[in-house]
Image (cartoon, grey):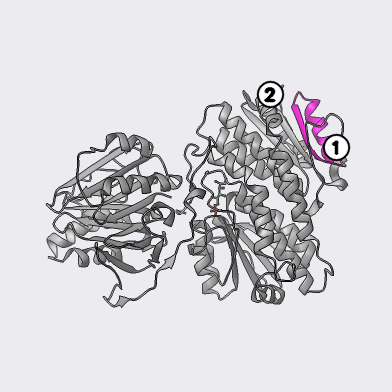
Amino acid sequence: MCGIVGYIGRKDAKEILLHGLEKLEYRGYDSAGIYVQNKAHEGHLFKEKGRIAALREKVDTSVEASAGIGHTRWATHGAPSVRNAHPHQSASERFTIVHNGVIENYQEVKDAYLADIDLKSDTDTEIIVQLIAWFVEEDDLTTKDAFKKAIVALEGSYAIALMDSEDPDVIYAAKNKSPLLLGKGDGFNVICSDAMAMIKETDQFVELMDKEVATVTRESLVIEDFSGDVIDRDAYTAEIDSDDLEKGTYPYYMLKEIDEQPAVMRKLLQKYQDDNGDLTVDQEIVDTMLESDRIYIIAAGTSYHAGLVGKQLIESMTHIPTEVHVSSEFGYHTPILSEKPFFIFISQSGETADSRQVLVKTNALGHPSLTVTNVAGSTLSRESNFTLLLHAGPEIAVASTKAYTAQIAVLAILSEVVGKSKGLIHKGTMLHDIGIVANAMQAIVDDKEKIEELAAEYLSISRNAFYIGRGMDYHVALEAALKLKEISYIQTEGFAAGELKHGTIALIEEGTPVIALVTEKGVAGHTRGNLQETKARGAHTMVISMDGLDRPDDQIVIPHVNPLLSALVSVVPTQLLSYYCSLHRGNDVDKPRNLAKSVTVE
Ligand code: AGP
């Protein structure tokens, strides 16, 4: 959450920072700011509440500067406002910083060092810059030493960029837990939370690690540890196609990303295929999984929902018992673990702080782990033993769609490969079945006008809604409900169909939309019965069924696919229902209120 950028070079820093922030807006979008300074030591600070577009309006275009830092915010401490927007400055305005993360001991730091200073904001961030100034003034330290001393005093997560108006030719940077990249150019250097922000300037990036400090000038990037030892680290080439970062002719990224799902399925089949045309994954992953006696899937939000489907895939194809846990719960209330656990972290971004704190703990215990992520080189990917990539291309909309289906497809491929290795599966079908899924997805996205009409009919004025299902359909109901609530703001529950009558059915009123998912033969009749129970109490019911289990009145019938993979297809109409509902309500589909794409705070 929150995105930071920095540039020091020869071009117009304002424009580069603003463009970078636009690309990072998915990380937070309640306020933003930039600070630029020129060689004559003149600094200019611009901040605005709301989106980058609002900040752009506020920036004085006549200001000339070739170095600066910028920030787009997702509020943690202090309401979204100009006063709380970054960058923040020391009392003398000599030092300016941007920060992504949460300083857990900010009150203690304030009490110990800054009791006499009138803070200008309600943020935890401001104490960092005041502390740096305090160390420079009181302890007579250089800026770099004061920066180091300040960050050693901090507890929590941070990615920080610092500028000193008395030394306009350098940006200092450091990080702990929150991501930060350094980008190398010819006569310029950059910093950013995500390579996407600066890919227009360079594709050469160096990762900054925890407990390191970077000194960034026009000509050099120097990384050192806290004791001053210089660290030599090679740059890597970020493979981001700038076209993938644009919406093209789509009104919103979410619609583009829903439409891309058939292509993502096909791409995954290519990426995980060997020269003989068989599905394959790294043998070390397979062997480690085979040695384990229990799999623990750890994830949050939509990725957790993909994990629920993953459990069914893994257990049915590998017979390895599997548990799925919400990461923010697991880390602090860890169940008794089996003797040989294997951890699978599922995370689109690879940066989710809740999941990372679990990984830190499982690493400390020496348990093997795999990260299933869309972002190569992300924190979870780097810190776990193995990675399987989603190959979904950048997912920009806050509401995750193609990452969810890619996560399930990767887990299906992994399960089949492990099941084969274990001798449980003789002839794999996933290659063929996921191909069929891609075609089924295509049929649904090609018929989206019908779903738009259903969204208008069922959801345009409703206050609340329900998705119900059993088994795999229940897992999809949870994801469908999350998707609808996060972008339409309709209070939606995903519910086990059979459980409704045990209390929650009391919420059904005249006209309450209840959408049943019916793709599993063994329980289809039961789910339909539960839907009838809501209809008898006034619900406005809809059925999403699978071909073969459909009835004439069903509103949406998805093509028939391998029932183990039904989630990949049945979720697509629910994504489209959410999209159109949000659109009709006039919401910002891609940037729903209160949310951010990459959740890097606990
Ligand atoms: C999805 O629509 C959500 N925005 C959210 O639940 C997300 O899946 C969750 O924050 C986990 O993110 P991750 O996959 O990047 O770890």
Q: Horizontally, is 601 left or right of 533 in the view?
A: left
Residue 421, percent from left and from top:
77, 74
Q: Indicate which disc residue 550 carries.
A: 1
Left or right: where 181 falls relative to 324: left
> Does the magenta run of residues contain 529?
yes
Q: Is residue 112 visible?
A: yes
Percent position of residue 68, x then y: 25, 51
- The amino acid type found where label 2 is placed reads Glu
Q: Quadrant of residue 546?
A: top right
Q: What is the count of numbered marks?
A: 2
Circle 1 SS class: loop
Asked whether residue 167 is drawn in magenta, I would say: no
Residue pictured at 27% horizontal, 43% vertical: 121
Q: What residue is pinned by disc 2?
A: 457
**Closest to the observer, 441 or 223:** 441
Label 2 Cα neighbours within 10 Å, binned few <14 / some 14-19 / many ≥20: some
Taking 305 as reference, is 153 above or below it?
below
**Which callout, 1 or 2, points at the residue further toward the start of the chain?**
2
Q: Is residue 420 above or below residue 78?
A: below
Residue closer to the observer: 298 or 173 = 173
What residue lies at 35% left-to-right and 69% top-to-bottom? Answer: 211
Pointer 1: residues within 10 angstroms few (<14), some, or many (20+)?
some
- Magenta segment range? 526-547
Residue 474 visible somewhere in the drawing? no
Q: Which numbered dot is residue 407?
A: none
Under tag 2, what secondary structure?
helix
Quarter of image, res 321: bottom right
Left or right of 155 in this view: 594:
right
Position of residue 258 relative to residue 105, above or below, is: above
